[in-house]
Image (cartoon, rainbow, N blue to C red):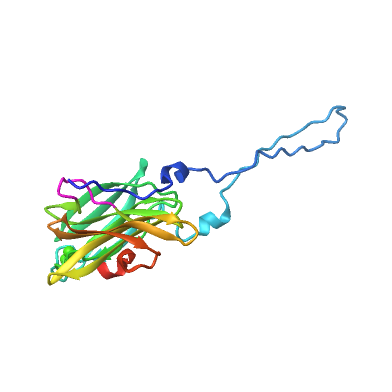
Amino acid sequence: MTPRTTPANTPASDIARRHLNSGGNTTVQKIVKTTVPLLASVATALALTAPADAASDPTVGRAKPIDTRVDLDGDHRPDKVVLEVVPDNPDEQQLVATVSGIRLTARIPLHSYPGIRPLRVVDIDADGRDEIIVTESVGANTLGFTAWGLFGGLRPVTSPDGTPLPLWEGGGASAIARYGCEPADGGQRLVTVQAGVIDWENFVYQGERVTYAVHDGVAVEATRTPAVGPRDAVPFLADPQTCA
Ligand SMILES: [Ca+2]
Ligand SMILES: [Ca+2]
């Protein structure tokens, strides 16, 4: 088994549930002018509310399910797919697909302060059956994903050992994390790029480009290419749109 590395990433869980409320209770003292010699004070704890910009931010989707249509089984008819937060567990999301009247569900980790994120529809193996990219983690500068499709059920794309294959995007200034697809052998391969900066003055990165042949939801490594260069060096380029 080939060891895989993951990019340096701020654990999203560290910030996942940081509370927006700030400040303390405000005490309102009302002086009552009566014959009573002492002041009567009324303390009122004002209800604090989350900042308005959070409530109106369209990217904050924790409570609202995402409902879309994709063709999971490749019969050219759209299949309903819904992604929602598991009601009693904000660290888990549920993917629900309805294919030919059969309801399929999958529970997926969710480490994202802004909640569930929009689904990306792809066809990683170019077999005419769509897969869905689900965001599992939102870090300070890196997103983590897994890809899901109909592989004998609603299942993730995995390594040959059966563990879900993570995909990354971002990296900030210190790293490069990308995924995409590219044509190969008359078909299509999944591509991942991971690199870290080795020269801060010139922004030179060292890492590798790995390609996978994906069949029936199993990603088998096809090539692994070490590379050194700037962010836009050809081996470091990968575009998620090429998997669509
Ligand atoms: Ca279909
Ligand atoms: Ca496919």
Please identify the residue farthest to the top as the structure is shown: 37
Q: Quadrant of residue 179?
A: bottom left
Is residue 27 rendered to the left or right of residue 106? right
Is residue 23 rendered to the left or right of residue 84? right
Task: State which quarter of the image contains the C terminus.
Answer: bottom left
**Residue at image coords 31%, 60%:** 227
Report the span colored magenta: 159-166
Q: Where is residue 119 drawn, in percent x and y?
A: 32, 60
Q: Please name whichever residue, 227 or 151, is drawn nearer the observer in this view of the structure.
A: 227
Q: Where is residue 99 drawn, in percent x and y?
A: 16, 60
**Residue at image coords 21%, 67%:** 78
Q: Please name whichever residue, 39 or 111, is drawn nearer the observer in this view of the structure.
A: 111
**Residue at image coords 77%, 32%:** 41
163 is within the stretch colored magenta: yes
Q: Determine if residue 163 is in view.
A: yes
Is residue 149 rendered to the left or right of residue 58? left
